[in-house]
Image: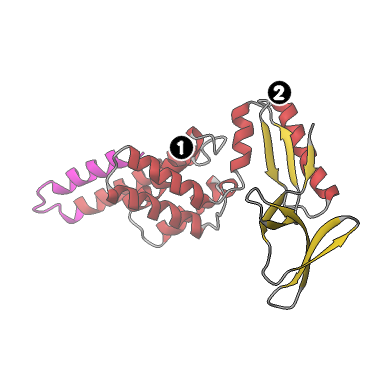
Amino acid sequence: MATVYKKTSTRPLPESAELYARKGEQFARWRLKNGTKKTAPVTTGSDGTLKIRTEATTYTAKYRDGQGIVCEVATGCRTKDAAQAVLKELTDRAERVRSGIVSQTDDAVRDWLAEPIADSMADYLDHLRSKNRSATHIADCERLAMRVFADCGMRTLRDIAATPVERWLANRNAEGMAPRTRNSYLQAVRGFCRWCVDASRLPDEPTKNLSQNHKNQLIASMRTYHRAFCSSQRHGGDGYEEGVSRIELADVG
């Protein structure tokens, strides 16, 4: 049966507490350092010592999820009515999974969307370490991707979108950032997003369509650079610039 309740816990009896009885039950009263008066029921611990029993200030929801597993979720609500509204949303989600309207994977993604990007980034970096990627590569992935997210004001996974990233890349292009450098930022973002999809933290890769558009822009930029460079080296050039251009184009994608 789905329900909401406030969790209780016990802790040692404060040294300054005064015991008293009310309606046959034992209580303790004491003052905090700031002078606030506190009271709490008294119970006997498993070790025979007296303890006070305290109740959480917010409600916890208890229900069965779409897989039939009993879950307890902190609602963050101080009133029972608000907590029951959260419980209804949770049980409705579970029913959609059980009825096949929503897959378990899609339902799991929903729980991650409101989480900070930094939390998933930490897990992504652990994933890269498990793949024996170099420390330099891992540090670059974090630095490049997090700069884009920070500059675009993206704080949670739900915030990640193609348009702000595309605008960010366009602004860097206007500032004169080299094509390969811009591509490095894009690939860092895409690598993180692809991992989030594989880990069921994003429903799809937000920048997947941006990649081809940006690739075409980079190729055009590199060809312009190559023509300008070749023109300046037309008398006495050794062909080195052509080799550089090929490497840069091969790295785009």
Residue receiving disc 2:
98
Q: Which numbered dot is residue 194?
A: 1
Q: For the magenta stretch, what is the residue range?
A: 231-253
First of labels 1, 2 by sequence position: 2
Residue 69 percent across, percent down from the top left: 66, 29
Label 1 CA crowd tier, 10 Å (few <14, some 14–19, many 20+): some
Residue 150 shown left or right of residue 79 in the figure: left
Name the residue furthest front.
Answer: 48
Residue 133 percent across, percent down from the top left: 29, 42
Residue 116 shown left or right of residue 87 in the figure: left
Can residue 55 be seen here? The reply is no
Compute the Cα span from label 1 to label 2. Answer: 28 Å
Element class at badge 1: helix
Instruction: Name the image quarter holding residue 192.
Output: top left
User: Up-down: is 37 above or below 123?
Assistant: below
Residue 239 percent across, percent down from the top left: 13, 46
| Type of the residue with mark 1 | Arg
Element class at badge 2: helix
Depth-wise, is mark 1 or mark 2 nearer the camera? 2
Is 235 in the magenta? Answer: yes
Give whichever of 227, 28 is nearer the camera: 28
Residue 177 shown left or right of residue 155 in the figure: left
| Type of the residue with mark 2 | Arg
Instruction: Name the image quarter holding residue 57.
Output: bottom right
Residue at (40, 62) in percent of width and height = 175
